[in-house]
Amino acid sequence: MGAVTDWLGGLSGPVVYAVVGALVFAEDALFFGFVLPGETAAVLGGVLAHQGSVSLGWMLVTVVAAAVLGDSVGYEVGSRLGPRVLETRSMRRHAHRIGRAQELIRRRGPAAVLLGRFVAFFRALMPALAGVSRMPYRRFLFFNALGGLLWGVGCVLLGYFAGAAYSKVEGTVGRSVAVAAAAVLVLALLVHHFRSRRREHRDETDHRNGTDHRNGAHRADD
């Protein structure tokens, strides 16, 4: 992440806003969240604001606007393409989690758009599913804007204050200790991330095996 921050920090202010905004927008509008979570870009934007490369206020506006607009485009894609949007190869690999997202929409309605904003996979998928389910756009937009505001402000401020905390530690105990502490934190986050992915993969495998077993039993009964 440090290399990416240094690269972004070397760009001019308008370009930084454009890059961060594009990554946040693409996560929801084009399902890029499967590759690069938009929250990473938002947090990096906050770090750069702390470093003085960009304005904190304008970074907040950029991230929130990109999140709301990206969700709206994702909704439009789902509304126009319908269930076909779920039939691509990349979507079929996540059939179990898509089913969970659809169940969340059935149970929570538009509130699922707000709740899904805080889960990486659901954040990238929920707007399209809302469009597929023909959720009224006005209701979708309210929860979309509320979620985008809470999520965008939270992620940018997290990066901003994390940058401030790093600077304070570095000035107090030295650069080497600060770097070591940051490395430990990043390692812990990575371990948590991969454990979560492994658990989700295991759940999907168990679900698939259970479905195959039931189908085999039905064929045997026939």
Image (cartoon, rainbow, N blue to C red):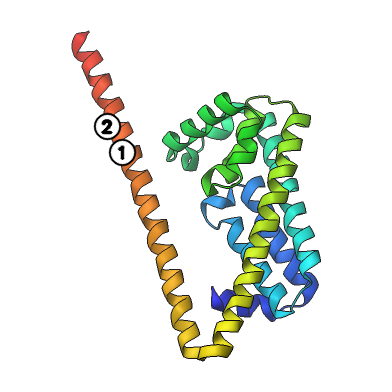
**Residue type at the position of mark 1:** Thr
Q: Which residue is mark 2?
A: 209
Q: Residue furthest top?
A: 222
Q: Position of residue 77 (x, y in %)?
A: 68, 36
Q: Which residue is mark 1?
A: 205
The residue shown at (79%, 72%) is: 55
Residue 81 appears in the picture as rendered: no
| Mark 1 vs mark 2, CA separation in Å | 6 Å
Q: Residue 14 appears in which quarter of the rendering?
A: bottom right
Q: Position of residue 159 (x, y in %)?
A: 63, 68
Circle count: 2
Q: Under tag 1, what secondary structure?
A: helix
**Residue type at the position of mark 2:** Asn
The residue shown at (26%, 20%) is: 214
Q: Position of residue 34 (x, y in %)?
A: 52, 51
The residue shown at (78%, 74%) is: 13
